Amino acid sequence: MLRIAKIFIFPSTLALLALAPWAQQPAAAAVEPLSSPAYKCWTSGSGATYIQICISKHGNVVLLKAPTPTGAIDEGYVACLKTPAGAAASYYDAGSTQSGWAEPYKVTDAPVIYRKTTDGKLELTQSFSRDAEKRDFLITMTLYNRSGKTLYDVRLDRYFGLKDDPNVFNLSPRAVFAWDEPAFSKFVTMTELTATSYDTAVHTSGGWIKNACHQTTEPTPTAPGNWAGRISHNFGTMAAGASKTIKVLYRLQ
Amino acid sequence: MYKKPILTLVAIIIAAGIPVRADTEFFACSESGSGPNYFKVCVSDTGNVTLLESPKGQEHIRVPPIADPYVQSLHWGLQNSMEGFHVCRWPEWGGPSFAYSFDFGSYHPDAGQRGSGLADLGWEAPHRIDRPSGAGKFPLTVYRKTHLCYDFEGVWPPAPCFELKQEFSVDTAKRELAITMTLYSRVKWSQRNVSLVRVVDLDVDKTDLDDRAAFTGRSLIQFDGGPEACGDIGWPPEYKCSGGRRDAVSLTGLTPNYRLEVVDYRFLFDLEQLCDGYDGLGFLRTDEPRLTALAYRFGDLPPGASRTVKFVYRAY
């Protein structure tokens, strides 16, 4: 009896769901996070000058090595918004986990990576360039409002977390710093270069909320441990079709 | 027909030691951005960084000396407004003591050290300056020579020990000042244990006593202090720290070919240590005035040889 009921109820439920307005969009295929394998790597130098930086096809930095690796890295981005009706949404890709972003619909050799959110409200382009002599890696991100409506409280955060070595994290108003203590063998900085409204923060590895924007910071400098840092950009209100561009620079010093 | 008298006159002027030009503190400046992206840097005609301001209102080098006789005595009155260079070598009669040629700047009017022999020693005035983009602008290239060297036999005529070419360029987008330094040996014998050192007294956000510094093998990064670093060692209230996100400045050596040492001094400033090596490693939490330096160790420099290294200042 129960089995028969399931057969009858299930198709009718599907028919009702098909009438819902948000169901008119094609169903998004499952998107796997891409902390590995690396899609593109930049390598130069040898010995003490060796430097290697790799990104995934989603635009996550998946390897920083100069000359020793930083250890396991989760790196990526999260975008947040409110609709005119006040509904909040977030879309993130931290490398090892992700939600809300569709597979890139275009990736050029440069590379430039083009992605949209699965609900179609936002589009993100990411381009990358490396300066081997200065040991830095520039990420240019442009976020577009593709919703057809004005969006509010729009934010775009870039963040990274280091897991293997005990690292100290520190903040300036414009940058996040991480170094391995007590070895002092590597120093990673993430610096905002162009925006005017942004904030920096540090989180414990366990308390890092990857699908949230503008998370409150822990006190800095931290004790050696597993931490994550972020730069949170506040775009405010974005009209339909509007875009905002920011530049974030990683340095290996 | 007039060539000979003119040349003679030029020779007389040079022999009389008439300076090529007076010191100019803000010989080239770059100012860009606004708000958090503001970045201003100036370099003197002697090749010293005389101003590094970022963001607006936060100066990190051109800071007046601390008005505390005790602190000044510890630093020989030189601890502020210092940025420059130091070249070391074993003298002609051998080591292990070093002969020095340095110019540490000390351009701030309150410092009062310029020309005293404490802030600069052993360098002639610049004999050539290139500014291809025009007066007051970067890129800037400054050429200087040291005083004369003599070999063991006192061979005449003597030559400058070294010539130094310094090329300054600014990357406003990255808030960086790059300094490419080329050191030429101008004598006919091998100069021993040569070092080229970039020296700076960073006073991030106009203060020194609350700063902290971290080091790697090629960089020093100095932060304005946080609350943990302050308040318990009896400095006057104006040196207490306010905590939160604090500005930072770094100096990095970009050249991999030569041995690079990061040198840190707390309280004492030792010309000899700048030359023979003293690694200051670690994250220094103490509230002490400090001087920091990056030293390239070249070893022996054959006759006529040159070495090129690159440094970069960054504001965060």
Image (cartoon, rainbow, N blue to C red):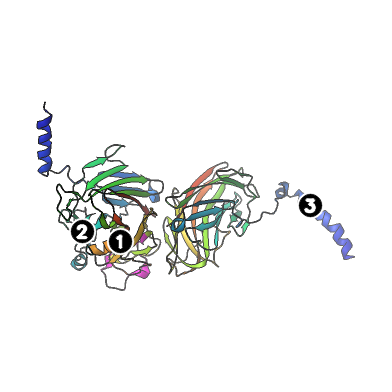
Above or below, A2 against A145 in this view is below
Quadrant placement of the N terminus of chain A: bottom right
Task: Please tell me whether residue B222 belongs to the stretch shown in magenta.
Answer: yes
Amino acid at pointer 2: Pro
Tell me which chain the residue with mark 3 is part of: A
Amino acid at pointer 1: Thr
User: What residue occupies the far top of the structure in this picture?
Assistant: B1
Above or below, A36 against B1 in this view is below
**Mark 2 and mark 1, same subunit?**
yes
Q: Nearer the viewer, residue A157 or B142?
A: B142
A38 on left or right of B22? right
**Residue at mark 2 to residue at mark 3: CA–CA distance:** 92 Å
Residue depth check, mark 1 versus mark 3: number of the one nearer the observer: 1
Quadrant in which residue B216 is drawn: bottom left
Q: Position of residue B113 (x, y in %)?
A: 17, 56
**Residue at mark 1 to residue at mark 3: CA–CA distance:** 71 Å
Q: Which mark is residue A16?
A: 3
Disc 3 secondary structure class: helix
Amino acid at pointer 3: Leu
Whether tag 1 and tag 3 are in contact, CB under 8 A, the answer is no
What range is drawn magenta here?
B220-238
Crowd around label 3: few <14 · some 14–19 · many ≥20 (10 Å): few
For disc 2, the marked residue is B91
Quadrant in which residue B290 is drawn: bottom left
For disc 1, the marked residue is B292
